[in-house]
Image (spheres, helix red, strand yellow):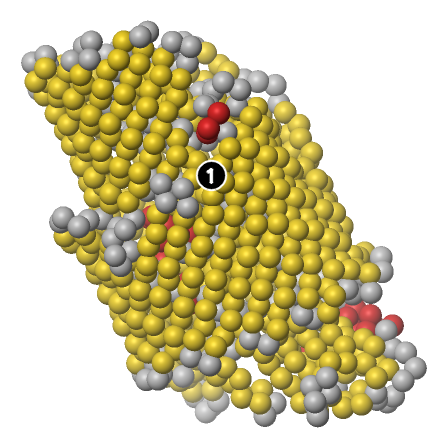
Amino acid sequence: MTLAATCFSQNKAVLAEAHKMVKDGAGAVVCYVVSNDDTPLEYATVTVLKPEDSTMIAGGITDEQGYAIIAPVPYGTYMVKIGYIGYKSLYINNISVSKEQAVVTTGKQKINTSTKTLKGVTVNAEREMLQSNLDKRVFNVDKSIVTEGSTGVDILENIPSVSVDLDGNVSLRGSSSVTILVDGRPTNLTMDEIPADMIESVEVVTNPSARYEPDGTSGIINVVLKKKKTLGFNISASIGAGMSDDKKNVYFGKYNASLNLNFRVKKVNFFLSYSFRSFSFTNHSTMNRMNVFNNDTSFLNQKSEYIMNGRPQNVRAGIDYFINDNNTISFEFGYRRRMHYHINDITSLTTGKNNSFYNQHSYNPKLPTHNFNASINYKYTSPTVKGRELTIDMFFSDNNRYDQNIVEKNYIIPPYDYYQSTITDNNGRIFNAQIDFVTPIGNGGRLETGYKLSYKLTKETYTYYIGEDSSLLIEQTDRNDASKYTDIINAAYLIYSNSIKNVFKYQVGLRAELAKNISELQSSNDVFSPAPYFNLFPTIHLRYDFNPMHSMQLSYSMRVRRPRGHELDPFLNDIDPLNLRQGNRELKPELTHSFDLGYLLTYKKMSLSANVFYRFRTKIISRYTILINDSTTFTTYANLNNSHSFGLEIAYQQELWKVWRLSLNANLFQTYVNADSLYDKSLRNDFSWRLRWNNTFTLPLDFQIQLTADYRSPSLTLNSMGFESGGAGQGRMSATWSIDFGIKKSFFKKTFSIALNVNDLFNTRQTYVESYGSTSNSYYESKMRHQRDSRRVYLTLTYNLSNYKVKRRNNSGENSDYDDMEE
């Protein structure tokens, strides 16, 4: 059997298409490129070169299935170069195209992360930490030393264009409206509950196709968890400990452990992962606020120390059953238990018309949160038609959280004691069902279509107690309440894509959604149920490959940002009586038109990408704060009119002298907000930028050192910055900078490693916020400072054992699949 028949027996359409490109005196070269786990690599560059001087004859880029057809290629003998962003190039010698064999295949080329010999050429295909394509960026977690022993929050902080503030709020390209998925699905997990050791990679997609849900006006962040499918037995285990300080005190009690198992025999793959984390952080804050209400002026000075402790545990298990070469069914289950508690001490002094001075101590008992999720996936791949696939996916998640906040206030002026207890019982459920179908159509075309049902239910009960003695609290039945929020979305999409002469590729898509929201409030028997709203979300992606080194892409998508649970929450939060907070049940979805123009250059050991983007947002969901009396602010949410955002992203990567890899990323953002009189004019125009520089040094004796510097300019913030999620809202945040350092040593052929990393080496991550707001009869101006124990030191031990094949001799002397382990 020929090489072509062996490697492409299931993709005869590829060879048929290649034969159509054969001309007089010239043939075609077909290449199939996969990653180390046999996943097809899209956008890999394949170049046919003259062996004597490396002159380029022809080139192309692999499609979504990992195939590239290079034509026309004049008859002769050549060298083929395979390149992929994040990998070193592979070279294949002695590829001969002739009249007798006009179509030549290179076979399946696997880019591995270990040193291999490929057709006599030794290559070392180490992935880059950050892989940049025109349509997305992929952050490979295993290449980041400075995030070992940390969490998903720390990983996001290391990704260009992504920012995380002190409260854990994530923003992408300067916008907090971003959708975070785990393995492509919605999640009840918070990023600080996912250990870095369980994450394979993080994908950032700024203009997704119509196949994705349109939620998140700035794009999608997809966290991909580790899950191997390689034959044999694979294990990865890590254990670590850490400490932190805030320039005054040193804090211990940071521990983590994780275990990832994968065992595959023939048609069955089993995987299991477990993680445990014990964490704590401390935040010191001060706020000085001037209040002017009806010509009366008062001053508020507050100091706060907030301590959070948590112990989340996660378990994931699943089975993949490969029925045959074309049918696979997968089952996955997950359980999370989080025990957490916090302590917050506030000292508050108000001077003016009504003076007051009190000390407040609030805390919550150690109460667990439980989350269970399950999914089933079926995939069919056509054996005769290349690219024809059918997938069916169902997902269910149930989350239960029981919280109790206990507040003790000791008033010195005027003298009295006050006690408060609030109990919140929250249950959230998510169910998704989706079917997707992909098939080639016409001459080189591709058609994708599918349907998705999304159902989300959130129930919350709220019980309120107050009193002047902690043992004699009285239930306030007039404050008790219960709410239920239901969100149902039916969606269907259609995408068509094709290419012209294999250099100009286009994709057009349309997603239709019918959404229904119901908000119920028990106390008033009030049901807020607006009419179902129907929206069409078009997407367009155009790409032109000038040659294997230069590419350009233009994309457009329409996106939506739906109100979140806490933004709709009708319960008044008065834990801090001078900084009240409440949601708004009448918020409307926010819509965005997003445009992106990107350029990508890959040359030898260097890559450069540049993206210019523009977003037009309407009905912007934003938080704002107003003064409601001479000493109290009230924070809620509203829909603003619209805004215009412009931005530029530049990512540069270079390998120098085989021991030094550097990446430099720059981001610039300009935003104009049309908010009528809700915001001060100075808060409607924002220019900000961010610069990140990463250096990785690969040294002898299996040492690696990583040094990362990050700077963020002053920027506009519309987030609440109070001590209990209230207080100062819209304003400007100061610049921040930090340096992270990590060193890693590998042993025993890189199966065991020890890593030491220091986040915020010089303890500089502190934030200053100036906030102000006004109405016709009031004005406030505040200055806040936040200082966390951001300098953290982690020591992590990791053990990896991969590709152990299980064999055993049976009575006949033949090898079976159960025997002693061989590497």
Q: Quadrant of the C terminus?
A: bottom left
Residue 145, position in %: x, y? Answer: 35, 66
The total number of labels drawn is: 1
Q: Residues within 10 Å of mark 1 (few under 14, many from 20)?
A: many
Query: For the view shown, which residue lies furthest in the right direction?
Result: 24
Looking at this view, is 698 or 435 the one in front? 698
Residue 464, position in %: x, y? Answer: 24, 18
Residue at 39% of width from left, 55% of height from top?
710
Residue at 40% of width from left, 84% of height from top?
822
Asked whether the viewer can see residue 592, the reply is: no
Residue 707, position in %: x, y? Answer: 35, 66
Please say if 215 is above or below 43: above
Residue 194, position in %: x, y? Answer: 36, 52
The kind of residue tagged 1 is Ser
Tell whether 688 sits left or right of 723: right
SS for dot 1: loop
Q: Which residue is mark 1?
A: 176
Please say if 291 is above or below 182: above
